[in-house]
Image (tube, rainbow, N blue to C red):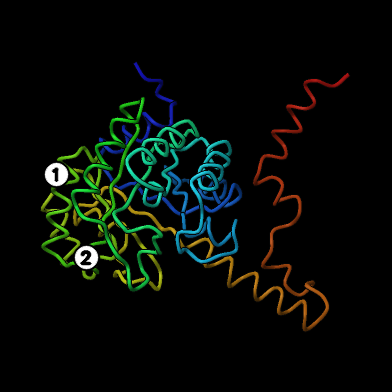
Amino acid sequence: MADSQDPVRRLRDLLEAPGIIVAPGAYDCLTAKIIEQAGFSAVYMTGAGTSVARLGRPDLGLATMTEMVANAASIVDTVKVPVIADADTGYGGVLNVQRTIRQYERSGVAAVHIEDQESPKRCGHLDDKRVIPVEDMARKVRAAVDARTNDDFVIIVRTDALAVTGWDDTMRRCEAYVEAGADALFIEALRSPEEAERVCAAFDVPMLYNFVESGKSPLIPSYELERLGFKLVIFPGSAFMAVCRTVTEVMRNLKEYGTTAHLMDGMTTLQESFEMVGLSEMLAQDATYAG
C-alpha cells in the first residue's frame, strides 16, 4: 500500500477527493516555499517561469529537458506538497518522451503535462502555434503511459489545437488522448466560460484550467471553475509576473534615489526571508550535532 505521505499518491488522492486542486506556479525553490506556506495543496512548476527565471529567455521552447527536470528536482526537494511539472512537448519523439517521463518521475514530481505542439513550441497564449498530427500525439501519450514505473504518477495531456485547428479537432484530439491513456486533459487557451463548461461536460477524466493573467482565457475564479467541473487550476504566471513588476519598481527607485530605505515597508526583513526557507529549523538541526 502506498505511503499516505508520498506526494505522488497524495496527488492521486486529491484527484479522487471532492474539491478543486489550486496549484500556483513556482519558477524556483523560493516561490515554491511561499506557495506551500500559503496553504496550497500542490505546486505547479511553470515552464514559462522556468524559461524566464533560469534562462532569461521567453517561453519559446528554449529550455531543455535536463534544465526543466533539474528545476523540478530542486523544487521537489524544497516542498512536501505534490509538484505538477510542465514537460513541454516531451522533447522529441516517442523514445524522447519515455526518457522524459522517467527523468521527471525520478525527480519526485507527482505529475507532468505534455502537449501536442510542434517543436520548438511556444507559450500557449502566444499566436502562431502549430500542432502535430493527432496520431503522432496519441503515440506519445501511449509511450508516456508505458514509461512510468508508478501507476499513481499522473500524466496530463495538453492540446493547443483550439487556436490552430478549431473546436471539432480539439474534441477529436481529446478523445484520442484519453483513449491512449491520458489521466487528465488540459485544453489550452479556452476562450469563454461557455467553452470551459462544454469541455468539462464532454469528458469523464479530470480537467485542468490554465489561469493566465493577461492571457487569452477568461479569468474565472477557482470556485466557479469547480462549479463548471474542473478538477485542477494552475496559475503559472502570477508569481513571476508580479516579481517582474515589483523588482523593476525597486530598481527604478534605487537608481533614482540612491536608496531603498523608503521601500522597506514593502519588503520582508532579512530574518523573515531566511525563516521562509527554514532558518530556525536548520539551526535547531545543526545544534543537535554541537559539542
Classify 188 as above or below 36. Answer: below
Q: Residue 161: percent from the left, percent from the top?
A: 23, 62
Residue at mark 1: 204
Q: Which mark is residue 162?
A: 2
* In the depicted structure, whether residue 263 falls above or below residue 67: below
- Give how far across and how far down residue 143 sits, in percent: 29, 36
Which residue is farthest right? Answer: 291
Residue 275, by quadrant, is: top right
In space, the residues marked 1 and 2 are separated at their CA atoms by 19 Å
Q: Quadrant of the C terminus?
A: top right
At label 2, the amino acid type is Leu
Q: Which quadrant holds residue 180?
A: top left
- Residue lying furthest top: 1
Q: Nearer the viewer, residue 128 or 231?
A: 128
- Name the element at disc 1: loop
Disc 1 or 2, which lies upstream in sequence? 2
Q: Nearer the viewer, residue 155 or 84?
A: 155
Callout 1 amino acid: Asp
